[in-house]
Image (cartoon, rainbow, N blue to C red):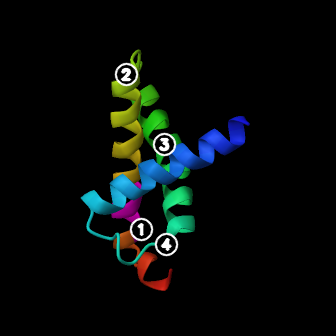
Amino acid sequence: MNWLISIVIGGVIGWIASIIMKTNAQMGWLANIVVGIVGSLLGFWIAGVLGIVPAGGILRFVISVGGAVLLIFLLQKFDVLRKM
């Protein structure tokens, strides 16, 4: 059950990040899920390195979306999204 929740939330996070970065038309639902989950991991890793401890749900959400946006930005710079 936890995997299903992670997939759904990852999809929502990836979808929001793709709307922010204006790549929504290029990305499908599977790419949104992958970007959401990996971007969340990236965001929490960076927050940990910076010493930020997300205590509330809103801060966790912002860190997850920020990580997904950063991941999309990096993928655009390496021209990976064009191949998806």
In the image, the segment drawn in magenta is: 71-75
Secondary structure type for disc 1:
helix
Image: 83 above or below 28: below
Q: Residue at x 41, y 74 (%)?
A: 78
Q: Nearer the viewer, residue 61 or 47?
A: 61
Instruction: Please name the residue that numbered disc 1 is placed on.
Output: 75
Q: Residues within 10 Å of mark 3 (few under 14, many from 20)?
A: many
| First in sequence: mark 2 vs mark 1 | 2
Residue 54 pos. (x, y %): 41, 21
Are the residues flagged by discs 1 and 4 in contact, CB closer than 8 Å?
A: no
C-alpha span from label 2 to label 3: 14 Å
Q: Which mark is residue 40?
A: 3
Q: Which mark is residue 52?
A: 2
Q: Is residue 42 left or right of residue 18?
A: right
Determine the residue located farthest toward the right in the rendered image: 1
Q: Amino acid at mark 4?
A: Gly
| First in sequence: mark 2 vs mark 3 | 3
Find out whether residue 74 is within the magenta segment.
Answer: yes
C-alpha span from label 1 to label 4: 15 Å
Secondary structure type for disc 4:
loop
C-alpha span from label 3 to label 4: 18 Å
Q: Main secondary structure of the magenta part?
A: helix
Residue 84 pos. (x, y %): 50, 80
